[in-house]
Structure formats: structure tokens, C-alpha cells
Image (spheres, rainbow, N blue to C red):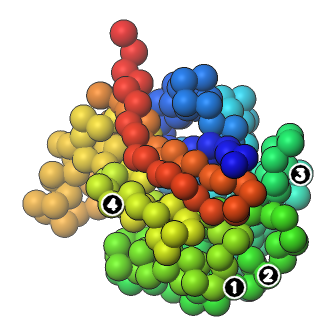
């Protein structure tokens, strides 16, 4: 059996999340032997969006590919990166067809199969009117060639929608999709599993950043917004930083996942 390990990190929230991711990426490569690292970067700019500075920092820290979600276009500086095929950053594939940017990216790890990375938005309880995520996945995955593998991210609120998409991938794309990772809620779930004997799945990977607040934001303003329903600014939390990730073990010959584990790596400075 030829095996490889892949680590997927949840949403990076602000500068504290970027530092936490850097610590986590180093850990999964050095201590766990991960060959590939993927991270959701859509919350890097003060909690919403991605800019060139954040992109470069996460690439230096070890990210092989970056994904985005519903905050994809919050910072316009992301657009040139999304339009550059040489930059491994992809927007959700089920945005309207007129939206700019790459709808998938491909990683070419040395000595290992090519890995397609595709992200879709969920539609249940989400603020953006996205197209059907399953139809978008089927369209994007059809571009894979023999010998390739694929990782799918489902950026969504509803756990039912995320696990349903995982089952679809296991049934429709067996031998190609080896991992389906949920993101967006910033709360790591306890349901990492192998679906259909084929792929590893988790309904939410968690997030990278300050766990001492409310899903990466300071708790005081978050509570004030809940109490008043007013448009209160939500500063990024810098306390109790952790990097949440999921580590997938893949049998590259059998073209399936053989193990999956959710982890949290402490990243608070000494």
C-alpha cells in the first residue's frame, strides 16, 4: 500500500489565525508527516476576505493551496490572484457563472498523484444565493484525468448538507474524491469518519485563530450585537490561539482514504 497524508485547516481568522496556521502547518509536516497542506483563507483580512499579504504569508508557512468561501470578494485585492492560474487559490465553484476567478486549483506534489481542490458553498441558511453545489462539483470534477485525486470543501452552515455532499461524492466519484471537508461554522465537529469505504469526511474542520472569543471574534462586541441587533464591529480575538485541522490518510494505489483524524494544535505564544 502506497500512502500519503494530507492536512486540511479550517478558516484562518485574522492575523492571529495566520500565526496559528503557520504553527499548525509546521506541526503536521514535521510531526505527522503530511505531504500536502490545504487551508481555507477567506477570513484572513480582519475576519473577512483575503489580501496578497495574507496569501504570501500562508504560502510561506506551507500552504499548497488556499480556498475561499462566502467572504471571497470582501477584499478586492483578491481578484488578480483568483485570475492568475499560477496561484493555487480558488473561489467557490457554484458562484454565478459571471463571477471572476478560478473555480478549482490543482496541486502537483512530487512523486504523488495530482490533487484537484474544489470548494462549493452550501445553500441552506447561507446569505449568498449560490448555484447547486452538487451540479457544480460534478462539472468541476469531470475535468480530472486518470490517476488524479480530488479534495472537496463544503463551505456551509447545515451539517446535513455537508454530509449529503460527502455521500454523493462517495457514490458518484469513487476512486477520485478521497476527502470532503466542511468549513464555515468555525466549530470543529466530532464526526470525522470514512464514508462508503471511500473518502474521509468531517462536517466542520474548525478554525485557526483566537478560541478565547466567539468563533474568532472578541466576545464582548459579539454579545452586544446579539443583545441589540445593531451593526457592531467584531474585532478579531487574539486570545487562546489554536489551529484546527483534519488529517487524512490516503492509499494512493487503491485511490481511497484509509483514515481521518480531527486535531487541534495549540498556537498561543509562550
Q: Residue furthest left?
A: 227
Image quarter (top left, top right, bottom left or bottom right) of the C terminus: top left
Q: At 51% from the left edge and 45% from the top edge, which residue is drawn?
A: 247
As helix, strand or loop, the secondary structure at mark 3 comes to loop
Q: Which residue is mark 1?
A: 138
Q: Residue furthest top?
A: 270
Q: At 31% from the left edge and 56% from the top edge, which residue is drawn?
A: 189
Q: Do callouts 3 and 1 mark residues in contact (Cβ within 8 Å)? A: no
Q: Which residue is mark 3?
A: 86
Q: Which residue is mark 2?
A: 142
- In the rendered structure, find residue 245 and report the number of the disc placed on it: none
- Judged left or right of residue 23, residue 112 is right
Image location of residue 13, percent across then percent down: 45, 43
- Judged left or right of residue 83, residue 201 is left
As helix, strand or loop, the secondary structure at mark 4 comes to loop
Tell me the CA gap for discs 2 and 1. Answer: 6 Å
Tell me the CA gap for discs 2 and 4. Answer: 28 Å
10 Å neighbourhood of mark 4: few (<14), some, or many (≥20)? some
Q: Residue 177's quadrant in the figure?
A: bottom right
Q: Is residue 110 above or below residue 31?
A: below
Tell me the CA gap for discs 3 and 1. Answer: 24 Å
10 Å neighbourhood of mark 1: few (<14), some, or many (≥20)? some
Q: Nearer the viewer, mark 3 or mark 1?
A: 1
Q: Do callouts 4 and 1 mark residues in contact (Cβ within 8 Å)? A: no
As helix, strand or loop, the secondary structure at mark 1 comes to helix
Image location of residue 71, percent across then percent down: 53, 62
Q: Do callouts 2 and 1 mark residues in contact (Cβ within 8 Å)? A: yes
Compare residues 246 and 217 and report the one nearer the observer: 246
As helix, strand or loop, the secondary structure at mark 2 comes to loop
Q: Which residue is mark 4?
A: 191
Sequence-wise, which precedes: disc 3 or disc 1?
A: 3
Q: Is residue 263 visible?
A: yes
Amino acid at each position: 500500500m502506497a500512502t500519503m497524508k494530507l492536512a486540511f485547516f479550517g478558516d484562518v481568522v485574522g492575523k492571529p489565525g495566520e500565526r496559528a496556521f503557520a504553527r499548525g502547518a509546521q506541526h503536521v509536516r514535521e510531526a505527522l508527516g503530511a505531504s500536502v497542506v490545504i487551508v481555507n483563507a477567506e477570513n484572513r483580512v480582519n475576519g473577512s476576505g483575503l489580501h496578497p499579504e495574507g496569501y504570501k504569508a500562508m504560502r510561506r508557512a506551507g500552504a499548497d493551496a488556499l480556498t475561499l468561501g462566502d467572504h471571497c470578494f470582501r477584499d478586492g485585492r483578491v481578484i488578480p490572484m483568483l485570475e492568475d492560474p499560477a496561484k493555487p487559490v480558488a473561489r467557490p465553484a457554484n458562484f454565478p457563472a459571471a463571477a471572476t476567478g478560478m473555480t478549482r486549483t490543482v496541486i502537483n506534489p512530487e512523486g504523488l498523484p495530482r490533487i484537484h481542490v474544489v470548494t462549493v458553498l452550501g445553500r441552506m441558511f447561507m446569505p449568498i444565493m449560490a448555484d447547486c453545489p452538487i451540479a457544480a462539483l460534478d462539472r468541476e470534477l469531470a475535468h480530472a484525468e486518470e490517476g488524479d485525486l480530488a479534495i472537496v470543501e463544503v463551505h456551509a452552515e447545515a451539517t446535513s448538507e455537508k454530509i449529503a455532499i460527502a455521500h454523493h461524492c462517495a457514490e458518484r466519484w469513487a476512486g477520485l474524491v478521497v476527502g470532503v471537508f466542511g468549513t464555515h461554522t468555525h466549530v470543529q465537529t466530532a464526526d470525522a469518519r470514512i464514508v462508503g469505504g471511500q473518502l474521509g469526511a468531517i462536517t466542520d474542520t474548525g478554525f485557526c485563530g483566537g478560541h478565547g472569543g466567539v468563533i474568532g471574534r472578541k466576545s464582548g462586541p459579539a454579545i452586544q450585537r446579539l443583545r441589540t441587533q445593531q451593526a457592531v464591529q467584531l474585532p478579531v480575538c487574539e486570545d487562546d490561539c489554536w489551529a484546527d485541522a483534519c488529517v487524512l490518510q490516503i492509499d494512493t494505489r487503491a485511490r481511497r482514504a484509509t483514515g481521518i483524524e480531527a486535531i487541534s494544535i495549540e498556537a498561543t505564544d509562550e
